[in-house]
Image (tube, helix red, strand yellow):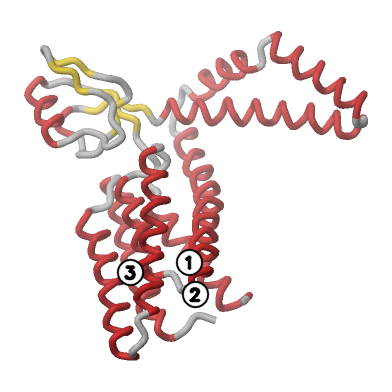
Amino acid sequence: MIGQEYWFLLGLAGIVSLFAAVEDWKKTEVANWLTYSFIVIGLAYRAFYSNFVGDWMFFIYGFCGLGLMFLIGCILYYSKSMGGGDAKLLMGFGVILPYSNFVDIFVIGIGFILLLGIVGTIYSLIWSLFIVFNNKNFAKYFKKKLKLIFNKWSLIAVLITSLFVIFIIGSVIGVLFFIGMIVFGVLLSYLLVVDELMIVKVKPDDLIEGDWLYKDIKIGKRVIGKCVHGLSKKDINLLRKAKRNVLIKRGIPFAPVFLISLIVGIMVFFYFL
């Protein structure tokens, strides 16, 4: 069960996650003041409580949790799997998660990452359906991707491999392998099309700091290149002066996943542990 000392932290996480989710939905970004405040208030509470009860392990666990999520957040951020605001939000969760010992920091921390992954996958698939249904060109793009993936040579390769599996292992496994490869190809085609539909042309006045360029842009002698950190204020001002529309790859608002994962995690703790 979650100790009473964590109730404030979980409540803080719920409030911050709610505000972050609303902000991400409206502005497709999470403000630094919100994420930094989350981290600072969480650590300050742990320090105050540790001093009050005379046990500083409560603070140390939270600080180590922050360190773990900082490392994971950096990996996800620089691999472009997560935006900067989401990575900082993840660090805040590293502070508030309920640890009882050093092993918990790793087990609960990685467990929360896995929970985020599961909830995020379901959330992203549902979100992608809205993108697909609101785009008239999806069917045309999807057919092209299917033809590209399921070309003559790929189908022959899958068929030969399936027959080989049937001969070596058995007919049931071979048939399942063939069906699995077909399903994988269809799913891959779908995801590739959705990824392309996330690329939109944006007017310079509508650009937001941190937007990811789809491709490099040359303005005079200067080249604004694609960067993991996205567009800077200086880049945006330059594009506005040049009045250049740009192709931006929009991400799915991910902050709501933190709120959903927090609720699911609390339910698991209270009702199943």
Give whichever of 137, 39 is nearer the camera: 39
130 left or right of 59?
right
Q: Tell me which numbered mark, 3 or 1, is placed earlier along the sequence.
A: 3
Indicate the secondary structure of the residue bearing disc 3: helix
Q: Amino acid at mark 1?
A: Ile
Q: Which residue is mark 1?
A: 105
225 left or right of 61?
left
Give whichever of 27, 37 is nearer the camera: 37
Indicate the secondary structure of the residue bearing disc 1: helix
In the image, which disc is placed on residue 101?
2
**In the rendered image, which quarter is residue 220 located in?**
top left
Labels 3, 2: front one = 2
How far separated are the C-alphas under marks 1 and 2? 7 Å
244 left or right of 131?
left
Tell me if mark 3 has few (under 14), some (14-19) or many (20+) residues whose alpha carbon lies within 10 angstroms of its own: some
Q: Amino acid at mark 2?
A: Asn
Give whichever of 229, 272 is nearer the camera: 229
Q: Mark 3–mark 2 contact, CB under 8 Å? A: no
Position in image of residue 273 (x %, y %): 62, 77
The structure residue drawn at horizontal position 24% and vertical position 23%, both measured from the top left corner, is 225
How far separated are the C-alphas under marks 3 and 1? 23 Å
Position in image of residue 3 (x %, y %): 47, 84
Position in image of residue 15 (x %, y %): 33, 69
Tell me if mark 1 has few (under 14), some (14-19) or many (20+) residues whose alpha carbon lies within 10 angstroms of its own: many
Q: Mark 1–mark 2 contact, CB under 8 Å? A: yes
In the image, which disc is placed on residue 15?
3
Tell me if mark 2 has few (under 14), some (14-19) or many (20+) residues whose alpha carbon lies within 10 angstroms of its own: few
The structure residue drawn at horizontal position 82% and vertical position 33%, both measured from the top left corner, is 176
